[in-house]
Every structure is written in C-alpha cells, then in structure tokens.
Image (cartoon, helix red, strand yellow):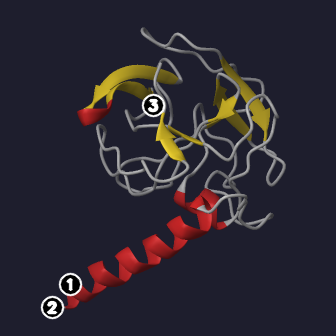
Amino acid sequence: MRDRYLTIASAILAGAVLVSCSSAGSSGSAGGPSPSAAGPSPSVAAPSPSTGGASAPASGATVEATAVGDLGTVLVAGSNGMTVYIFTNDVKDSGTSNCTGDCLVTWPALTVNAGETPTGGPGVTGTLGTITRADDGTIQVTYNGLPLYFFKGDSAPGDSNGVYTNWEAVTP
C-alpha cells in the first residue's frame, strides 16, 4: 500500500514539474541545479538509465538514429541509447536554452566536454553543434540549431516518455 502512495505522490510531483516546464513562455528559474554540474566526465554527459540524471561516459557517436517504439526512427544518445528531445520553446540558432532550473532537472541537457565536437552515427542527417549554457557554462549538444535534452522519466533505451506539450522526440 505504501508503494502505491509513493507512486501516486511521484506522479503528482512529476505532473507539477511538467506543467511548469510546458507552459508557453516558461523558462524555469535561472541558476537552478544542473545535472551535469558535478564536473566534466570523460566524454558525453548523459543520464544513465539506472540513475535518471547521473553522467555516463560515451562510446562512439554522440547521437545515433534508431527505431524507438511507435515514434519510428529518432535520435538517441550514443552513450546509453536513451531518447533525446527538443523543447519547442527553444529558438533555433539562438544559442540559448529556455529550459533552466526545475525544467532542467526533469529534462537534463545532453552535454559534451569543452573542446569536444559532437558526432552523429549512421542515419543522423542533420547538423550537430553546441551551445554554452548560460546557467552553468556546460556545453550542450544541438541538432539543427536546437538544444537536445533527455527525460528523467525514461529509464531504459527505447523509452519515449518525454513526449509532452512543447517536447518532441528528435527525428533525423
């Protein structure tokens, strides 16, 4: 019974965070904690499926194109196979992310170490780049000029639970 209450409480809390991140013009609070503020990792900083926010070292390409459930072929992190998303409140080629504070806790940024260049695997047809995040100075990966994020509610490769209002999985 206790597990049921914890599940319900978690769902309510997640819903509250989703509402704050998905409302038009919302940008969260600046200066909030960053999932990659722990310092540089050996390669791509990406949430691992088991921790939902900790960094995991990359192997190979930064992003890859792969089939994910009903979404078809979308981009995933090369380091862990987790689906990546764009925030439709971000402005293409602006060099900034509009997901900060609590939003960034729910949708952690896909980052690389300073000086690294993101790479795409087979099927990745768009342009990869980076921006420097204003809130913590980390280097966030972009695809066709839009910053890339994970969803902390995805727990295994192939999950696509982060498709919400203002959030989309990224097609190659």
- Marks 1,2: beta carbons within 8 A: yes
Residue occupying the far left of the picture: 1
Residue matched to label 1:
4
Cβ atoms under marks 2 and 3 closer than 8 Å: no
Looking at the image, is 160 positioned above or below residue 115?
below
Q: Which mark is residue 1?
A: 2
Left or right? Give the position of 119 relative to 139: left
Q: Is residue 27 visible in this depiction of the protein? A: yes
Please identify the quadrant where the N terminus is shown: bottom left
Q: Which residue is mark 3?
A: 79
Q: Quadrant of residue 113?
A: top right
Q: Give the residue type that dot 1 points to.
A: Arg
Mark 1 vs mark 3: which is more N-terminal?
A: 1
Mark pair 1, 2: CA separation: 5 Å
Residue situated in front as seen by the camera: 74 or 56 = 74
| SS for dot 3 | loop
Secondary structure of residue under mark 1: helix
Query: Under tag 2, what secondary structure?
Result: loop
Disc 3 crowd, CA 10 A, few/some/many (<14, 14-19, 20+): many
Q: CA distance from mark 2 to mark 3?
A: 37 Å
Q: What is the quadrant of residue 92 in the picture? A: top right
Q: Residues within 10 Å of mark 2 (few under 14, many from 20)?
A: few
Indicate which disc residue 162 carries.
Answer: none
**Residue sitting farthest toward the front:** 24
Residue 172 in the figure: left or right of residue 148: left
Residue 56 visible (yes or no): no
Which tag, 2 or 3, sits closer to the chain's start?
Answer: 2
CA separation in Å, label 1 and label 3: 33 Å
| Image position, residue 64 (x, y; %) | 44, 20
Q: Residue at x 50, y 29 (%)?
A: 58
**Of the pair 56 and 133, the residue shown nearer to us:** 133
Residue at 66% across / 55% down in the picture?
Answer: 38
